[in-house]
Image (cartoon, rainbow, N blue to C red):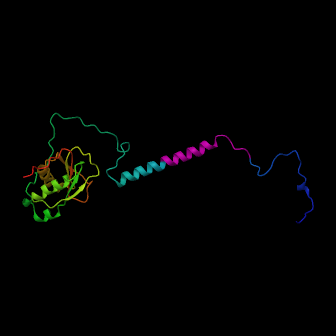
Amino acid sequence: MASFPRDQFDDVPRDIDRVGAHRAPRKRGRGWIRFGWAALATVALVVAGLFALSLYDPRFEIPIIGGGDETVAPSDTPTPLETAVPVTDPSTLDPAFLQTITISVLNGTPTPGLSNIAADQIRAAGWPDPSRAGASNTEEPTTFVYYGSADAEGVARGIMQLIGASDVRLSDAFPTATITVVLGADYVPPAAG
């Protein structure tokens, strides 16, 4: 091992207790500043994300940003809603329009096979053969017919009458079919025979 001549740094007084890196003690309360900045950044990111989501998805709205509830004074006479005339006979439709109609029947009950029965009932009435599947929720209380565009409302109302559904609703929740029937617990299959 190499030996070096002694110099001034080798003579350290014995009464000094410092060893290693010499840092000043931390100031009290500095942790709260970091926490505050982290909380502020989190809030800013969440608000920015919710705002961006409300811009991209029209179904998502933030009530605080939307301007609050606007109350309308009730009138004495109810305003009648304009509804399309139910189309009960598919042969009365334009053949080109009839070819664009796709129908889907979803079983929203725990009873197996109801979507097949309802789809056969719709097909027997002359409508295009519906696709059949189980709904994601098997506890639907009521049967609804959903339609994807306003020009299909008459068809939806005709199918509503055919299968005895409660009502029709305009919805973009089922983009794969023009008309989607979601069977609920109130659906009564037609009598056999």
Residue 92 image offset from top left, x and y in percent: 7, 59
Give the image location of residue 139, x and y in percent: 26, 45
| Left/right of residue 49 with respect to residue 32 in the rendered view | left
Question: Which residue occupies the extreme right position in the image?
Answer: 5
Q: Which range of residues does the magenta coloring cover?
A: 24-43
State the count of labels.
0
Residue at the top extreme, as displayed: 76
Observer-nearest residue: 187 or 166? Answer: 187
Task: Give x and y (percent) for residue 124.
Answer: 10, 58
Residue 140 x/y as whole percent: 24, 46
Q: Nearer the viewer, residue 10 or 34?
A: 10
Of 1 and 71, nearer the camera is 1
Q: Residue at x 60, y 44 (%)?
A: 33
Which secondary structure dominates the residues rendered in magenta?
Answer: helix
Residue drawn where x is 74% and y is 48% of the image = 23
Asked whether residue 43 appears in the rendered view, the answer is yes
What residue is drawn where x is 21% and y is 35%? 74
Tell me if residue 142 is in the magenta stretch. Answer: no
**41 magenta-colored:** yes
Q: Is residue 84 visible?
A: no
Q: Quadrant of residue 123?
A: bottom left
Task: Give the position of the N terminus as an image quadrant.
Answer: bottom right
